[in-house]
Image: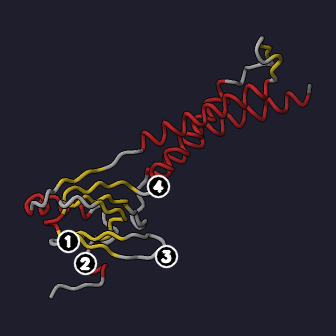
């Protein structure tokens, strides 16, 4: 009986922890850190139908540059595309789906623990006698998976910029495009205008 009471108190405190933890994590991450390097994954479709994928590296008045690797362990080949060859660039922040899935899963676990705090042992004609722990575990797993899927879907937002090889469209959206680049200024790139 004492063991059951300890398990109940432990599950109740876990439920409160898993409910509060995702809220505090999202509050901490919602504050933008100016020194943090943010990478955006880019899918570039050119006018001839080629599809290129990488991290958006740099953009200036003439070209857009993407890199095939972000970490030092990957090769860092720069791919340069002139603006007159650009069709569409689709951008998405790296790791945003994973973070959304983790937060959604944690919220699902917390919700399952809160909903099952008053559940007791049960019997079913199909499964027979079912222990409280098995019921709680079933809810936790189910809600965690559902929360992870919903969190990944909600955070799966992207930005699409349409150029269609048009110089005016490119120059008009260049400042917005630079907001997504790893290197925003030419002096950071180590190049100078001649």
Q: Which is nearer the N-term, disc 2 or disc 3?
A: 3
Would you name the residue on which mark 2 appears? 186
Sort mark 3 into few (<14), some (14-19) or many (20+) by Cα contacts within 10 Å: few
Q: Callout 3: helix, strand or loop?
A: loop
The secondary structure type at the circle numbered 1 is strand
Q: Is 145 located above or below residue 52 in the figure?
A: above
Q: Indicate which disc, 2 or 4, sits on the residue closer to the N terminus.
A: 4
How far, Cα to Cα, is label 2 from label 4?
A: 26 Å
Q: Quadrant of the N terminus?
A: top right
In what quadrant of the picture does the C terminus appear? bottom left
Q: Nearer the viewer, mark 2 or mark 1?
A: 1
Marks 2 and 1, the one that precedes in the sequence: 1
Q: Separation of disc 2 and disc 3 at Cα?
A: 22 Å
**106 on left or right of 55:** right
* Crowd class of label 1 (few under 14; some 14 to 19; many from 20; radius 10 Å): some
Q: Residues within 10 Å of mark 2 (few under 14, many from 20)?
A: few
| SS at badge 2 | helix
Residue that mark 3 sits on: 72
């Amino acid at each position: 009986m004492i063991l059951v009471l300890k398990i109940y108190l432990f599950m109740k405190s876990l439920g409160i922890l898993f409910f509060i933890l995702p809220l505090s994590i999202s509050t901490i991450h919602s504050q933008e850190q100016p020194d943090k390097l943010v990478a955006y994954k880019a899918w570039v479709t050119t006018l001839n139908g080629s599809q290129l994928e990488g991290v958006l590296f740099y953009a200036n008045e003439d070209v857009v540059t993407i890199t095939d690797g972000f970490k030092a362990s990957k090769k860092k080949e720069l791919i340069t595309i002139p603006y007159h060859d650009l069709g569409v660039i689709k951008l998405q922040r790296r790791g945003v789906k994973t973070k959304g899935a983790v937060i959604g899963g944690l919220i699902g676990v917390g919700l399952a623990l809160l909903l099952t705090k008053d559940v007791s042992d049960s019997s079913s004609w199909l499964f027979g006698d079912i222990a409280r722990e098995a019921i709680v575990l079933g809810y936790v797993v189910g809600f965690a998976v559902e929360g992870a899927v919903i969190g990944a879907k909600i955070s799966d937002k992207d930005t699409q910029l349409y150029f269609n090889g048009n110089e005016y469209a490119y120059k008009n959206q260049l400042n917005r495009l630079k907001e997504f680049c790893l290197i925003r200024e030419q002096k950071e790139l180590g190049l100078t205008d001649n």
